[in-house]
Image (tube, rainbow, N blue to C red):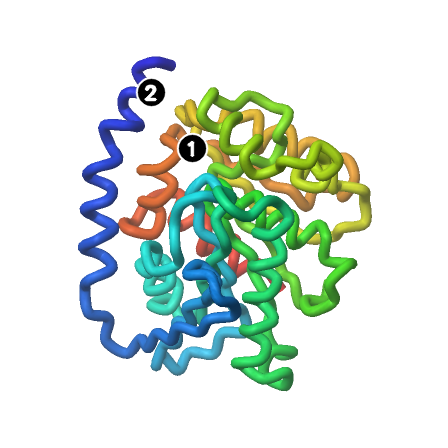
Amino acid sequence: MLRWAVEEYLSMPILLVKMLIANQRKKKGIRVEKIYFGKDHGQYVLFFHSDDRRKRNKLIFFVHGGGWIFGLPDIYRFIGYFFARTGYPAILVGHRSSLFHKFPDQLEDIEKGLRKSVEKLGMGEWKTLKIILCGHSSGGQLAALMALNGEKDPIVCREQLSGVITLGAPLDLSAKRNYFIKKLVKLLVKNPMKWHQANPIEQIHGKEEIPFFCIHGKKDTILGMDQAANFVEKYNQYNGDLGKLFIAGNLHHSDMIQIFLSGRTETKAVLEWIQERE
């Protein structure tokens, strides 16, 4: 475990360089628009449009990670480029930091970002799309909550929501977490009464009928593998076999993010899963 933790932290500088290079490369035929939906510097969405004329009826809505404190959509531009190159329009959404704004502000922000997306695309075009929610780490937690709480916000009806992809996400806040993550969660959820609302596994009540594809690294020392395993087990108890667990022998940051930077087994699995969604 210690060796994996050291491997994780040593991989970060190289990963950041790769992300920077990928973000700076010119992408022919891909247009990016930034639209704010609030006054905070994190309250905006990035739209990625491709000139690729292949007909795609799915849109990827991605929530970045960063422990609910750090991160902006601009840092993850390469993910928008990745999906746009494959013919899928993509939207990257940001949110306010938990340093100054507590849960459920972050969840409300990504819902506002989704509404801004509808406004941008127009209701007519929006209704023709199947939506795939996707998120890395803390962003996966928010994407999962958005799907599980969908009955409360009909902006994405059940017929449109085609699935959810989580990458190394905290889906069971009562499961194994390292000391740093425990502090981040306590910073996010100050009100104990809202703890269960922030815990995706506690929002499973049955009849969700939304496919989940949960990828988690076997070497993840930041968020234990049981985060995804516990969630998928309970989800399938209530919803048949709609939850799929993909265990990768990978780390939390470097290998999860590498899915969008280089061709890997997980990259192929993600694209095939998206293609299978109706």
For marks 2 and 1, give the CA distance.
14 Å
Circle 2/circle 1 CB separation < 8 Å: no
Q: Which residue is mark 2?
A: 4
Q: Which residue is mark 1?
A: 248
Q: Earlier in the sequence, mark 2 or mark 1?
A: 2
As drawn, 242 above or below 234:
below
Report crowding for label 2: few under 14, some 14 to 19, many 20 or more residues within 10 A (C-alpha).
some
Quarter location, residue 121: bottom right
Residue shown at the point (68%, 67%) measured from the top left: 156
Near-viewer residue (160 or 185): 185
Give the residue type at disc 2.
Trp
Residue shown at the point (71%, 39%) measured from the top left: 194
Report crowding for label 1: few under 14, some 14 to 19, many 20 or more residues within 10 A (C-alpha).
some
| Residue 7 location (% of width, % of height) | 27, 24
For this orientation, the residue located farthest to the front is: 100
For this orientation, the residue located farthest to the top is: 2
Image quarter hosting the N terminus: top left
| Residue 253 location (% of width, % of height) | 36, 37
Q: Nearer the viewer, mark 2 or mark 1?
A: 2
| Residue 227 location (% of width, % of height) | 57, 29
As drawn, 240 above or below 106:
above
Image quarter hosting the C terminus: bottom right
Residue shown at the point (28%, 20%) measured from the top left: 6
Relative placement, left or right, of 170 versus 72 is right
Give the residue type at disc 1.
Ala
Residue shown at the point (76%, 50%) measured from the top left: 208
| Residue 116 location (% of width, % of height) | 56, 73
